[in-house]
Image (cartoon, rainbow, N blue to C red):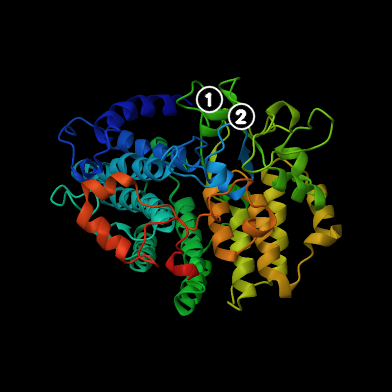
Amino acid sequence: MKNLHYYLSLAAVALGVTTVSCSGDLTDLNNDPKSYVNAQPGALFLSGQKSLADTYGSAAVGVAPFRVLAQSWTQNTYINEANYNLASADAPFGWWRDLYTKALSNLKQAKIIYEEEETDAGALKNNLAIIDLLEVYTYYLLVNTYGNIPYSEALQNSTPFPRYDNARTVVLDLLRRLDDDLAALDVSYGSLGAADQIYNGNVGKWRKFAATLKLKVALLLADAEPQVASAKALEAVATGVFTSNDDNALFKYDGANATNSNPVWQVVAQTASNKNHSPAGFFISTLTQFNDPRLRLLFTQDAATGYSGGIAGAINNFDDLSQFSAFWLNAKLPVNLLDYSETEFLLAEAAARSIAVGGTAEEHYKKAIKASILYWGGAASDADTYIATETAIQYNPANWKRLIGYQQWIAFADRGWDAWTNIRRLGYPDIDAVSPPADANGNLPRRFNYPPVEQTSNPDNWAAAVANISGKQDVTGAKLFWEE
């Protein structure tokens, strides 16, 4: 990927001036750097896009422990996050820092420079809309991790101490922005080209991405704002959502070096001595119980030629357990931000909720499972046999939340944040009941607490945000508005 090398070399320079240090003063992320005169907008865009993918796909302790929380993975030696002790490595700070100061900051600056330098009005409109889609995606991660967040005043040089916007208001505004982006995207004009490592500037693909993300945001509101959810879901489907795995939003890596390699590979495979992560025993046992063909696609056999995972929250012996498959531990494996399997699960859920998206819930459910198996390298015949014959997964409208919840959890094996969010949203699998960690610090977190530094660097706005949390305490057990 010659273009990836070229843009990432420029992106490294851009990142150097757009990210803040880890000194702890997050107010800096609201200050515009002063050295963008010679920065190339394509490099800044790729910096933001790559930072988003790196953070979302991260397996690093202290940034994204979501695979561990959702128990597709668990920890073997350093087991704090597996037991819900998020303060040990300060994941709430790491996730916040990387999304605000790396992804959003670079995307914002790319917008500014494109507006100054792009002379093709049609291409400019497309560029700004695509950048905005990634901003919407990033804010979607933030608002549904913490609740109220800096949003309307975030990253503003004139506002060093941003207020926290109401989470419901933020989500509704993200839907508005998606509508604006869909209206702006025009396939008659070009866009970002090689700076875009997801769709290479294909505006038609980005329109599908926008519609699919709109469907996703709409279904998040299904219980809290059912009328909005129904209307926006129907609009998204009418616009045109993903229809095959060819539409998947995959950020591509070339594997030439650690920086340009998949973030799971960086943490698990690059260092041979890193034995802190293994498949979770509950995940392995569920796949085994279901006779799921993804078991052998995702994991290797253990020392006893069977399949086994670690006990969540306990000290485990890495060498005795199944390990991650070569397909998973591939330096070139893309980070999957949004895909066709998820689209079909969302359509299945919409149909189960009597939203007339076309087709039945069962049809979409089966398509979703097959798309997941094919994505992981399985054969169509294996997928068809599994869907047709495995009793435990047969669709039943009386248990649609449980069936979709479990199958989407499996499909999200490498998409930990979404696996965790779907558990919170649909209630399945109920980790607290079926697989509580060995020494759990309470129940499964429903949110991240705010980074502790916010209490000192932005105390008034932090206090106002905490006052709006259910129970008025900055705790992980407080539910967000869409599950209260």
Query: Front-most of 62 and 323?
Result: 62
Query: Front-most of 148 and 45?
Result: 148
Which amino acid type is shown beneath numbered disc 2? Asn
Which amino acid type is shown beneath numbered disc 1? Gly
Q: Which percent across, then down, holds residue 250?
A: 53, 42
Q: Is the residue 15 above or below the residue 227 in the image?
A: above
The disc placed on residue 364 is: none
Element at label 1:
loop
What residue is pinned by disc 2? 330
Mark 1 and mark 2: span between their CA atoms? 8 Å
Do the residues under discs 1 and 2 have CB atoms within 8 angstroms? yes
The disc placed on residue 255 is: 1
Residue 49 quadrant: top left
Element at label 2:
loop
Classify residue 300 as left or right of residue 127. right
Classify residue 186 as left or right of residue 284. left
Q: Earlier in the sequence, mark 1 or mark 2?
A: 1
The answer, for residue 200, to whether it is visible in the render is no
Classify residue 129 as left or right of residue 370. left
Residue 91 quadrant: top left
Q: Is the residue 7 above or below the residue 177 in the image?
A: above
Q: Which percent across, then down, holds residue 170?
A: 34, 64
Dot 1 surroundings within 10 Å: few (below 14), some, or many (20 or more)?
Answer: some
The answer, for residue 81, to whether it is visible in the render is yes
